[in-house]
Amino acid sequence: MSNISHPTDCSHRLRFRQVDYFCAMFSKTFGYALRAATFVAVHGKNGEKIGLQELSQSLDIPHHFLGKIMQDLVRHGILDSIKGPSGGFYANEQTAETPLIELLKITDGSLVFNQCALNIKRCNAEHPCPLHHDFASCRDGMLKAMSAKTIAVLAAEIEEGKSFLVR
Amino acid sequence: MSNISHPTDCSHRLRFRQVDYFCAMFSKTFGYALRAATFVAVHGKNGEKIGLQELSQSLDIPHHFLGKIMQDLVRHGILDSIKGPSGGFYANEQTAETPLIELLKITDGSLVFNQCALNIKRCNAEHPCPLHHDFASCRDGMLKAMSAKTIAVLAAEIEEGKSFLVR
DNA sequence: GGAGAAAAAGACTTTAAAATCTTTTATTAT
DNA sequence: ATAATAAAAGATTTTAAAGTCTTTTTCTCC
């Protein structure tokens, strides 16, 4: 038997992962984009425009950071926007039909789909890392859901009180 | 119809996620820890010691960064180590029986288990974000696998050529 | 057409993970 | 004892995401 003492807490010495969120399958940017786009879809149903101010306050997202994300969504045609007084963001014909996976591609890139949980190069079904199969099914289920669900689906859920965008 | 052009590529302007890996459910640190611990379990079966040099070269992990991670594992009793010439890391009675989830707790903390995919505060089954249920089942499946599998299980897989720690 | 409002854009700062470099400590062998 | 070796420890740097601040552009309304 080893007589070495093994403290279970070593936070005084070394700390990995000091952030307030973990297990971040997706970037914060993605979460912000998804929530904001859905918010616009819900609250801008009849062409009303939603301003950044309202968006960032309602969803508790940093104003200017959200601004950049919204620009990106507009650039990709997910939403439209108008400048000036009474300007803002509003849904277009594409908004509701956008699958979540599309947003993910915009914010996090398309490499999301075939990444190794252990960051091993060329990990694949024939040459798997020890977590490959577990992670593949986990991730694929997630991606499947995100391919099936559109912003319209989320908006409907929100309106029915089945899920929530904030708090 | 909108007559605004919507370029699909805006990498010249804004880029989120510039890293070479995505969808990082776990930290790199965790991957390094898991691979290194398993390597020791495989190649140090009969008490042979494995040096950092050999570990970092064999697994293509930065030497000193791996050093810190190994220290942390030793501190937590997952492995033992000896300094000096012919020193190195070696398996102890706990090594083989360590479930992967234990390593994850050490490297990434215990908050991994109940995080919201969209970073919404107090997201839970009763007050879910739009991705809560999808993500919960995805993550729980992963955690279940990692609770069931021990380093010994991985080591056996490696030895049978069923999975790989490198490349 | 000038003032105000709001998105767009750009530059900069902060934070934490990841990585690197240097020094110290413990062990072995001569 | 001393030199060599390897882990342990500490300090520092790098990278990218996240966040902030400032300026510019576009639009509306008076």
Image: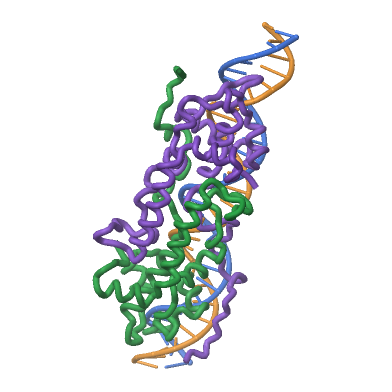
Chain colours: A purple, B green, C orange, D blue
Q: Is residue C5 above or below residue D5?
A: above
Q: Is residue A138 visible?
A: yes
Q: Quadrant of the N terminus of chain B?
A: top left
Q: How many marks?
A: 0
Question: Is residue B67 in sight in this rendering?
Answer: no
**Above or below: residue A41 compared with residue B125:** above
Q: Quadrant of residue B31?
A: bottom left
User: Horizontally, is A54 left or right of B130 in the view?
Assistant: right
Q: Residue at x 43, y 68 (%)?
A: B146
Residue A128, placed above or below residue A93? below
Residue nearer the viewer, C22 or A53: A53
Q: Residue at x 60, y 49 (%)?
A: B120
Q: Could you say where residue A41 lies in the image, as x and y percent from the top left?
A: 55, 32
Q: Nearer the viewer, residue A33 or B34?
A: A33
| Residue at the spot 39% in from the left edge and 75% down from the top edge | B151
Query: Residue B46 at x, y = what percent?
Result: 32, 87
Choose top left, top right, bottom left or bottom right for residue C2: top right
Q: Point out the residue furthest to the front here.
A: A160
Image quadrant where one finds the C terminus of chain B: bottom left
Percent x, y of residue B80: 45, 82
Along the line of sight, the residue nearer the viewer: A106 or C16:
A106
